[in-house]
Structures are given as structure tokens and as C-alpha cells.
Image (cartoon, rainbow, N blue to C red):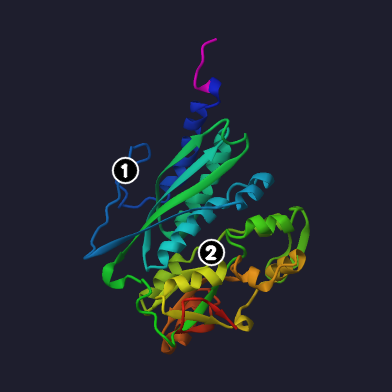
Amino acid sequence: MSNSYKSSGVDKEEGYRAVELMKKNVLKTHNKSVLTNLGSFGAMYELGQYKNPVLISGTDGVGTKLEIALRQKKYNTVGIDCVAMCVNDVLCHGAKPLFFLDYLACGKLDADVAAELVLGVTEGCLQAGAALVGGETAEMPGFYKEGDYDIAGFCVGIVEKENLIDGSKVKEGNKIIAIPSSGFHSNGYSLVRKIFKNYEEVIKTKEFGEKKVADILLKPTKIYVKNILALLEKFNVNGMAHITGGGLIENLPRCMSKDLSPVVFKEKIRVPEIFKLVMERGDIAEDEMYGTFNMGVGFTLVVDEKDVENIIEFLRNLGEEAYEIGYIQKGDNSLCLK
């Protein structure tokens, strides 16, 4: 029998079936600015009326959180994480996410699994108001094991140059506002998986109630886009940070100049019980926890002191329980945890 692409492990027909399964949900994310349908060599997106637009781009993946999804055969949430990791990053500069592209790689393609993974991506795009304009599904036998998948994404956002948030407006005496996370988001999972080896274990926490470990760990990353964009229409925000890998220690200093340092009071941080459980079970030092996990803070704002109360009230009306956790001082750009 002669060789074929299928005999080498790549099933083109399954790829075509995957695309058909994805199409309906992907098209839900499109708007009038999307000028091409799926299948073109490149996606076309019309910017519309901007005076001096700046494009902000970001790319990221889901990391080892995906391993839990694969073992649990629950594929429809990690796509949300993939979108969130990208759109929350571009949001830090005041940018509105315009469009998103995903990349899915596997050892042997299962069209139903691939479609479910992309269903999560489309849900994330809908939450962020971004159009899913394209992507790539790569079947790579011999490189990935059968049943293995990886997912990554790329986002482009836009902001008027006069509204760009780049940290230059952050100054001494500014206050830091925390916006809660929905859990671990997509960071620290290599450590979390060492501690919670039994995903079927049922644990009880204040924020999640009584749930299986797997359900807690697969809680999708919160997407902050719509509420923060609404906030930016009414208030001046000097700096914003998405609290991802490296926690508050690494990410908060990124949103200000190198001669300023953020000061955060640990007693003000509303640390969810699940993080305390990880710390206890893993015998993890407090500094390691704050340098690995978001500790219940998914996003931060740096604002003028006079605006703190009004911003917190505005966010509360949108369902975000924001609260003040610290201030900005002169320094060496390292976080001071008090």
C-alpha cells in the first residue's frame, strides 16, 4: 500500500470536520469590522474612526492547567483562560481588544475535542468583546502524544494615543486598588498539581463551597475587559497591572516608572481560603506564595487618592468587589509587602 498523509498520522478529513464544528460559534464573535470569513489566508479587520490609534498586542497560553482539563475530559473552559491571559494584558494599556487568533496543537486530532476547546475560546472572546478572526489547528503525530493538546492565542487591541496608559502618569502618593481574581487563574499550576494530586477529592472553602478539586482548579480566569473599559470612560487611571505569573511581586511594579515602588499591606489583601490551603498543604513560604500566585488579586489599578472611593463604588455597581491595598512611594521599583 502506498504512503499517504493519513498513514503518517495526520487525518485531513478530521481537520475539515473540526473546522465545520467550530464555525457556528466562531461567527458569533464577529462584528461589522471583520471583513473576511473563515478560510482566507489572512484575517481582515477594519479599524474604523480613530484619530491617532496605537495597536497593542499580546500572546500567551494556558500552561499546565491544560493537563487537568485533559485528565478530566473537560475541554470547554481552558479556551476562556487562553483569551483572558491575552486580553487582560493588552487591557493594562487602556486598549480595547479588537480580535483574537488561536493556535491548537495535538498528537492526534479529535474534531469533537478540538471544537470544544475552541468553544471556550469563543466564549472568552464574547466576554472580552473581541472577534475570533482565525486560528490554526496543527496535528503533529510523534511530537505530541495521542490525547495531548496545547493551546495558545494572540490578541490585538487598540487605544487612542492620548488615552494610552503606559505608567508615565503614576506618581508618588497614588493609591493601589485590587480587583479580585476568580481563583488561581492560569498561573502556578505546576506547583498546584504537586499539592492536589487527587482531582476527585472534595474540599470545602468559603468562596467555592463544597466542590471537587478539579472543578476549583478549572475555574476560568476572569476577564476584566468590559468593566475596566467602562471605568476608563469616566475616570482617570494612571496604571494597571494584570496579576499573572510572578504574582503581585513581579507584576505590580511593571505598571510604573523604575524610580517608583508599590507598597502593599498584606493584612488588606482578601486572600481566599483555597490559597491558604495550598500554603498549608504544600508547606510553602509566604514570600513564595506571593511570588507565584495572585493570592486573590487578579487585576490592580493605580489611581489618584481623590478618586479611590468613587472608583470602588463604580466597580461595585458593576459587580466587582474592589478595595484599596496600598500606595506608591519613591523607590527601586520593587514591591514592598508590609
Left or right of residue 70: residue 6? left
- Among the 4 quarters of the image, the one containing residue 92: bottom left
Determine the residue positioned at 51% across, 11% down: 2
Q: Give the image location of residue 71, x and y in percent.
A: 68, 45
Q: Nearer the viewer, residue 271 or 72?
A: 271
Mark 2 and mark 1 residues within 8 Å of each other at the beta carbon: no
Q: Amino acid at mark 2?
A: Thr
Q: Nearer the viewer, residue 311 or 294?
A: 294
Q: Is residue 4 magenta?
A: yes
Q: In the displayed structure, would residue 137 be above or below residue 97?
A: above
Q: In the displayed structure, would residue 11 be above or below residue 293?
A: above
- The quadrant of the picture occupied by the C terminus is bottom right
Q: Give the image location of residue 89, x and y in percent.
A: 44, 63
Q: Is residue 17 magenta?
A: no
Q: Amino acid at mark 1?
A: Thr
Camera sees residue 298: no
Determine the residue positioned at 32% across, 41% down: 42
Q: Which residue is most to the bottom?
A: 306
Q: Which residue is mark 1?
A: 36
Q: Give the image location of residue 292, x and y in percent.
A: 61, 65
Q: Which residues are magenta?
A: 1-6
Q: Which residue is mark 2?
A: 244
Left or right of residue 47: residue 135? right
